[in-house]
Image: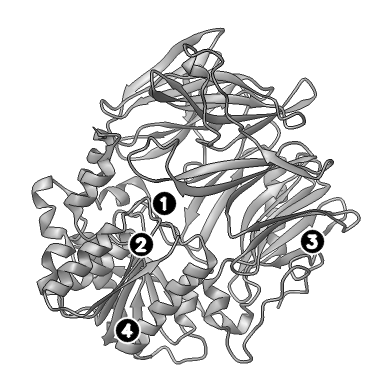
Amino acid sequence: MRIPAAIGIVLAFWAIGNAVHAAPLEAYGRLPSIQRAIISPDGRNLALTVSNGEASKIVIQDLATKAIVGNIDAGTQKVRWLQWAGPNHLIITISVTGYINGADSRRTENWLATNYDLIKRVQRPLLTGLNATDARDEARDSLNTLFGEPQVRNVGNRVVVFAPGITFVNGRGVLTLFRVDPDSGKMEIESRGESETNHYVIGAAGGVVARSDYARHSGQWTLFTWRGHWDKAYEETAPLDAPYIVGLGRDGASIAVNRPGKDHRDVAEWSLATNTWGSPLADAGEDEIFDAETGRIMAGVTATEDGRRTTFYEPKDQAVWTAIGGAYPGSRITLASVSVDRRKWVLRVDSPTDGPAYALVDLDAKKGSWIGDEFEGVKSADIGPVQVVHFTAKDGLPLSGYLTLPRDKPAKALPLVVLPHGGPAARDSAGFDWWAQGLASRGYAVLQVNYRGSDGLGYAFMARGFGEWGRKMQTDLSDGVRYLAATGIVDPARVCIVGGSYGGYAALAGVALESGVYRCAVSVAGVSDIRKMVDWSATSLGQQDLETLRYWSRYMGAAGGWDEISPALHADHVTAPVLLIHGGDDTVVPYAQSVEMEGALRRAGKPVELITLKSEDHWLSRGATRLEMLRDTVAFLEKNDPP
């Protein structure tokens, strides 16, 4: 049990009730009580996004006085990032579903940033947009929309925000780097790229030092360095798995680039001085951590079976991190933010018994303090135990996953929910999972399989999934069911499958392409007709995106076999009830995919229900509709497979 929060500011804004004996579904299904926590560069202020499960606030607290120095009501806006720009400015990024300048052929998720001034207590847009003063100067027209995460630097003792946005050349949007003074709000163009520019790198002392271009049709990736003019430094052809810049290297005089190889993926440094590649960085590739002031890479993060391993490149930082880990034995520690002098560390601490919470470690004070629980309404008694499972697929491939069990129930002949992750180039990890825990709290065992094609387990394992949509990627899930049934933990006659995105496709494929494994299926924003999905996602502004076509073909195989693995085209084979749930604002998998599946099942005389989540996107970003999804899923499971 955790000691009550020493920096208890969450409960000052909202109180979330608890059931006497078990947490209600609201505790799992609504937005987390704390969504993010970030300390200012000078270590003085702590900024949090807090929520009552549906509406959010951004709260800023002075750590020395405990006074609230900022309180911004975000309502139901989708807050995506918090980022400090020096000690007195907080950049808040939200996303909004809509059209870009009225010109895009379909709606997208647009990223908008505001700058909150702690001194003046005012909030204004970060990018205000530029307008051409001359009709011939079209390239000065710009949007107020971000196209990447801002970077902050100290330039001549002044804080400058470098923000990627869009200007227009010959009616076509071009990635442009803007330079913004957070004090005055003044905005100007730092660098404007070409039609295929996709990334910029800012030097440690400010100013652009490199950019990359990628031709999505041909697959040509090019690295340019700035030497008073753009100099082509390196290029390679990468129709898939193109390199991408992750930021500045360790010394600030190099660029860290994720370089996928034929059978591996590494992060290597490109020297700006010698125009040569260095050796791959240790423990980098899945995620990276950067210095908030200079932008240099500080650490690499890799996946492990029981969590994530963080490796700092400076021995002093690594020693501190090792000591911090020892202070929270048995928990999975993730760095949320750290002050520039590395004296204050904000952590996400995921305890197997108490769940995730945020903590502040103050090295000068030699103590740690709890900020608050990530899910305020979920207590120790509401968390089901999670264990790693290992089994073998039919073709002999070793597989693993995570089994969440209902608390205080014998692990024998339990009803099972298979919960495949999205992606598919993603993975499930050890630790608290709100969806799995919510289902387990109702009496179900929950299996999350890292099927072939999952990321974070080595390139070779991911490559085993190429061409295996609806095939071996699917049978990996049912092989997991058979393994658990053989152990006696689950009842093979009481198994349902639930998933979102690719997991939603797998749920539909589980009842349309397989037989006798699942008693019911819930698809959340799942693909049902692959040919139509590929056509939709590969077409933008009337042009065919060949990179997207190549990506889909990699996982799904040749186009001639797509109909074989499209659940909507095999609705007559479905023998289990199906629940379809889809957000009306989904810009990743179109809502039409669930409409198509519903129509196919109804024409085949099969039991089906379609629930539309109003104003919801692909990621279940809104508390009310995320909870609606969980409630409807549980009600459907309890009706068709009672626990």
For marks 2 and 4, the one nearer the N-term is: 2
- Comparing 105 with 571, the one in front is 105
- The answer to whether 475 is drawn above or below residue 541 in the figure is below
Q: Classify mark 4: helix, strand or loop.
A: helix
* Residue on which disc 1 sits: 456
- Comparing 213 with 467, the one in front is 213
For marks 2 and 3, the one nearer the N-term is: 3
Q: Which amino acid does label 2 sit on?
A: Asn
Q: Which residue is drawn at 48% across and 17% down?
A: 139
* Residue on which disc 3 sits: 368
- Colour treatment of the image: one colour
In the rendered structure, the answer to whether residue 643 lies left or right of residue 76 reads left
Q: Which amino acid does label 3 sit on?
A: Gly
Contact flag, marks 1 and 2 (Cβ < 8 Å): yes
How much space separates mark 3 and mark 4, taking CA atoms? 42 Å
Q: Classify mark 2: helix, strand or loop.
A: loop
Contact flag, marks 2 and 3 (Cβ < 8 Å): no
Q: Residue at x 72, y 71 (%)?
A: 14
* Residue on which disc 4 sits: 487
For marks 3 and 4, the one nearer the N-term is: 3
* Residue on which disc 2 sits: 450
Q: What residue type is labelled 1?
A: Gly
Q: How crowded is mark 4: few (under 14 residues within 10 Å), some or many (20 or more)?
A: few
Q: Quadrant of the C terminus?
A: bottom left
